[in-house]
Image: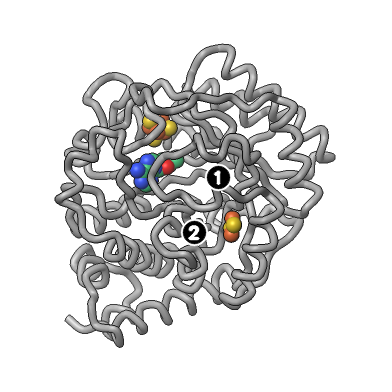
Amino acid sequence: MNIDHILNKENFTKEDIIYLLSLKDENDLQKLAKKALEVKSKHVGRVVYYRGLVEFSNICAKNCYYCGIRRDNRNTNRYNVSDDEILEAAKYSYENGYGSLVLQSGELDSPYFIDRIDNLLREIKKLSNNELGITLSCGEQSKETYQRWFESGAHRYLLRIESSVESLYYRIHPRDKKHDFQTRIKALQDLKEVGYQTGTGVMIGLPFQKIEDLADDLLFFKNIDVDMIGMGPYIEHEDTPLYQFSHLLMPKEERFKLALRMIAVLRILMKDINIAAATALQAIDPIGREKALSVGANVIMPNITSNEYRGDYLLYENKPCIDENAEDCKSCLEARIHLAGDSIGYNEWGDSKHFKNRKR
Ligand code: 5AD
Ligand code: SF4
Ligand code: FES
């Protein structure tokens, strides 16, 4: 196999992907990065779209083995941002030209929670003159709930599959009704059927994860034909069951580099989707998100959660921007993105081009 030959192919086989994900040679890596950036420039442009991220609650009914805010972690200070504060954050997003908002939380499915989101969606649409785009990231819900939220104004939804390899999925989740692999796949299908721009993603560098699992993940994304991907390195958290397998992990820098290769290969594989530069990248490398932009990512989710809560939404260790506020992140990111050679698509939804293309 030869890198130039693979990069010139119309479609990648699993073997091609494994080859690309395993690259070590600096020269080869540069070729991969260059190709990914070319594809990005040609198909989605060198524009970064913002989604102001509100992590509005860390209360979660699930128990994912990797996550710091899992239900059974007693060392987490649980919070729930008030509706007023969420609307305040939405207003911030709107007034600062972010174009879109992401509401993210732990997973709950009580009627109260469902009504609450529904109401927030309507209020946010109202306060922004119907202009702010809204993405939800609130876990697995029934198709009826997805439908209801869609009608109230959400038009994008993020639900990471975490790993598309079923055996690995069950090594990082309890094997029970609340964490059922098929249910998760079904949820992704429901989201697409309801009409959302649908996003998924995985963690990279998990214990027990092999390169070929990651190749399968990329092929899974292509196969279910999603519109958006967010994926980043797995980062251990001391208060979680998966922590006991930390000795199996590759060094953090390796996980980071592997994540960049995943993004680059994905950009070449799915040319017109939106790819987020995940915050977890910055937990390892101070300019991790900008590096992701230079290999194909085109979306950033600046944290606009109030300072007061940031330190309690700790899915993993070393999370960046905990002591910063929305204003800090705004000016910080703007400078970094320009340094990376991209511009910022202020006041635009920055919808997935893939979504429009597949609807044609
Ligand atoms: N390391 C990296 N990412 C994590 N997430 C949860 N826990 C971790 C961790 N320890 C990611 C999951 C989830 C998203 C909101 O955060 O992929 O979908
Ligand atoms: Fe809850 Fe999401 Fe964390 Fe799982 S990853 S425990 S669903 S917040
Ligand atoms: Fe938050 Fe730089 S992006 S401080």
Q: Which amino acid does label 1 sit on?
A: Gln
- The residue located at (62%, 36%) in the rendering is 308
Quadrant of picture, ligand 3: bottom right
Secondary element at tag 2 = strand
Quadrant of residue 300 within the rendered picture: bottom right
Q: Which of the numbered marks, if any, corresponds to residue 277?
A: 2
Secondary element at tag 1 = strand
Residue 322 x, y percent position in the rendering:
54, 47
Marks 2/1: CA–CA distance: 18 Å
Residue 218 x, y percent position in the rendering:
32, 56
Residue 178 x, y percent position in the rendering:
33, 21
Local packing at callout 1 (Cα closer than 10 Å; few below 14, some 14-19, many 20+) is many
Local packing at callout 2 (Cα closer than 10 Å; few below 14, some 14-19, many 20+) is many
Q: Is residue 180 left or right of residue 189?
A: left
Q: What residue type is labelled 2?
A: Ala
- The residue located at (49%, 18%) in the rendering is 109
Report whether residue 71 is seen.
yes
Look at the image and name its color scheme.
Answer: one colour
Quadrant in which the C terminus appears: bottom right
237 and 23: which one is in front?
Answer: 237
- The residue located at (49%, 59%) in the rendering is 277
278 and 184: which one is in front?
Answer: 278
21 and 228: which one is in front?
Answer: 21
2 shown above or below 248: below
Q: Is residue 313 left or right of residue 248?
A: right
Residue 33 x, y percent position in the rendering:
40, 77
41 shown above or below 292: below
Q: Which of the numbered marks, if any, corresponds to residue 197?
A: 1
Report whether residue 186 is seen.
no
